[in-house]
Amino acid sequence: MNILVIKSSVFGDNGNSSALVNTQVEALKAQHSDATVVVRDLSTDPIPHLDGERVGAFFTPADQRSDDQQAVDAFSMVLIDELKAADHIVLGLPMYNFGIPSQLKSWIDHVARAGVTFRYTESGPQGLLDSKPVTVLAARGGIYAGTDNDTVTPYIKLFFGFIGMTDVNFVYAEGLNMGDDVKKKALEEAKAAVS
Ligand SMILES: Cc1cc2nc3c(=O)[nH]c(=O)nc-3n(C[C@H](O)[C@H](O)[C@H](O)COP(=O)(O)O)c2cc1C
């Protein structure tokens, strides 16, 4: 089983979401002795923000791309191929300023490709990737799950569903900035939910 790990905490492995990701990966490895793990840490290996040149590269037909445009396309395809090769995706999802980390948004902007990971049909958008489990470890300073203020969870679910992956599950560690006791309990409960 191939596990694709995506970490997006700006604190790298010191992030709460990253710690939960590592717990989740250990739990999967304990269940699958053949597990292989590919780690994409978006803080140590950042992805450029989307700009006009990069979108232009995506939209240019393959046989007309310049060398620079080919490099942009090839980089995006590496990320997409990692998704295709995975049997299970484990995503660390901090909340920063009510949204997802900009590093993760850049990853999404390089993975959402018309004609590659989704297409529009007469009946609406269609995801082009095979569905596989996506486990999301969501870490927040406050408490939002299940409320209208949780803009992050529906967005992530929408994105993965859009490219074909509808089996998205969330584990929450909330209230991490609401005092030591709340934080300890939240992390313990999240770790228990993972295992
Ligand atoms: C720059 C920044 C912005 C944050 N914004 C929010 C926020 O909008 N809502 C919230 O509940 N917590 C917020 N937090 C707290 C984080 O969600 C919390 O520290 C969580 O552990 C982040 O995940 P990480 O430790 O994996 O990076 C913020 C933290 C930082 C560093």
Image (cartoon, rainbow, N blue to C red):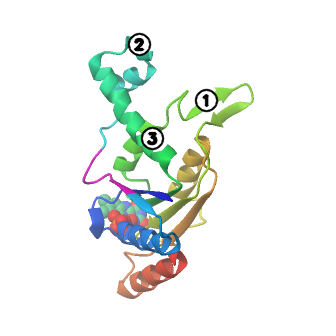
Where does label 1 land, which residue? 119
Looking at the rendered image, the disc whose residue lies closer to the viewer, 2 or 1, is 2
Residue 135 in picture, x, y percent from top left = 53, 62
Where does label 2 land, which residue? 63
**Corner quadrant of residue 141:** bottom left
Is 101 within the magenta? no
130 relative to 190 in the view: left or right: right
61 relative to 134 in the view: left or right: left
Is 40 within the magenta? yes
Residue 81, label in figure = 3
Q: Nearer the viewer, residue 157 or 63?
A: 63
Q: Residue at x 53, y 69 (%)?
A: 171
Q: Are marks 1 and 3 in contact (CB under 8 Å)?
A: no
Q: Is residue 149 visible?
A: no
**Corner quadrant of residue 117:** top right
* Dot 1 amino acid type: Arg
